[in-house]
Image: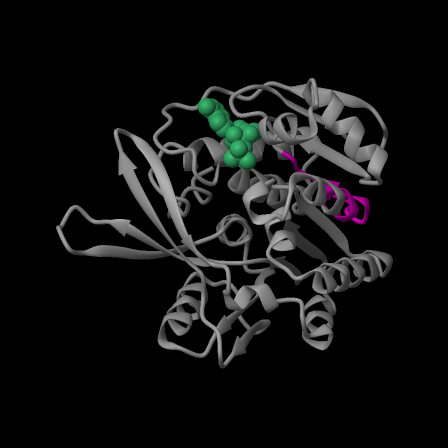
Amino acid sequence: MGRIVSIGECMGELSETGTPGTLGMGFAGDTLNTAYYLRQSLGSDWQVDYVSAVGTDGLSGRMVEFLNGEGIGTDHIRRLADKTIGLYHITLKDGERSFTYWRNDSAARQLASDPATLARALEGADLAYWSGITLAILPNQDRIALIEALSQFAGRGGTVVFDPNLRPRLWDNPETMRGWIHRAAAISDLCLPSFEDEATWFGDRDPAATVRRYIGEGARRVIVKNGAAEVTYQGADGAMTTLPIPPAEQVVDTTAAGDSFNAGYLAAELCGASTSDAIKAGARLASRVIGARGALVANVATTL
Ligand code: ADP
């Protein structure tokens, strides 16, 4: 039996239903999306736990129920009496999605404020997955605490996997973001950036430059996603390789493309696939996810 922990913030998603005056309610968030697709992709010999913090109110309860219903472990989600979950609303206008967020004071911002809870969550896990969004929402001292906890986890032989998921709006300024992202990559075994974001915020000229930069910061392995273009990666052997991505049958909604790629990749690797086969599995899963609407698409992994 193996155990994965995915650490971060899951939010309530409010979306238009087409019925005036009625909003639909769902749940999503980058690290939750990856946990969801890991759960779909892996057999019952793997436990997938979500590590976060929510409130004790009804809405928080619904989120925890949702996660349980999807087979995702919730034992390491803190319940804070004076907080609730973050929310966002999606507006679709002329095919363009725009988002409104209420997350500045969400419970998840305290997910790393209790060292004992964090240590318990990581105890005995094989792999810890987190992202730049996980880091962005934390107060400074908790960023340090989380990096320290994950670094100790890695020291005990755990695998730390990091998606930079750059979101400058969540940071005080881009310089601060860049500094913390590199500190996070430095303690991660595997770093899974998306080139477009990296080019924008780090000025990388090509995906190979992204690979080299994260390796230079201390990541052991780096896999750079680049939309429909080829994936560029460097493994522990130090060789830089590119792998083309098969074209997606149809692109309906690219939400969670990167998150689902990461899950497909990790699930394949945990089942013994080579790096190139695991990348192909990640790309297959992502292409199915972007062929349907929404971040969480049911039954896409089981048919791979
Ligand atoms: P993010 O969602 O983080 O921006 P990317 O856009 O780089 O990530 O996409 C992540 C992965 O999703 C890609 O590596 C690829 O496998 C798949 N993907 C994304 N867009 C397409 C596309 N248009 N056609 C085929 N695959 C795609």
Farthest residue, direction front: 173
Look at the image and tell me in which quarter the N terminus lies: bottom right
Quadrant position of residue 233: top right
Judge whether residue 234 can be spotted in this image. Answer: yes
Q: Does the stretch in magenta take in 16?
A: no
Residue 188 colored magenta? yes
Residue appearing at x 49%, y 36% in the figure: 257
Task: Identify the magenta region.
Answer: 181-193
Q: Is residue 121 above or below residue 269?
A: below
Q: Give how far across and how far down residue 299 sits, in percent.
A: 39, 46
Residue toward you, 44 or 258: 258
Place of residue 261 in the rendered image (x, y in percent of width and height, measured from the top left): 55, 37
User: Up-down: is 162 above or below 81?
Assistant: above
Question: Residue 154, located in which quarter of the rendered image?
Answer: bottom right
- The residue lying at 40 percent from left, 77 percent from top is 57
Locate residue 272, reporting x and y percent: 69, 42
Asked if residue 236 shows in the view, the reply is no
Residue 99 spot, x, y in % from top left: 38, 44
Single out the residue that lies furthest toward the left. Answer: 20
Q: Looking at the image, how many numbered discs can be counted on the residues?
A: 0
Which residue corresponds to the image point at 37% horizontal and 70% vertical from the top-left? Answer: 59
Q: Nearer the viewer, residue 90 or 152?
A: 90
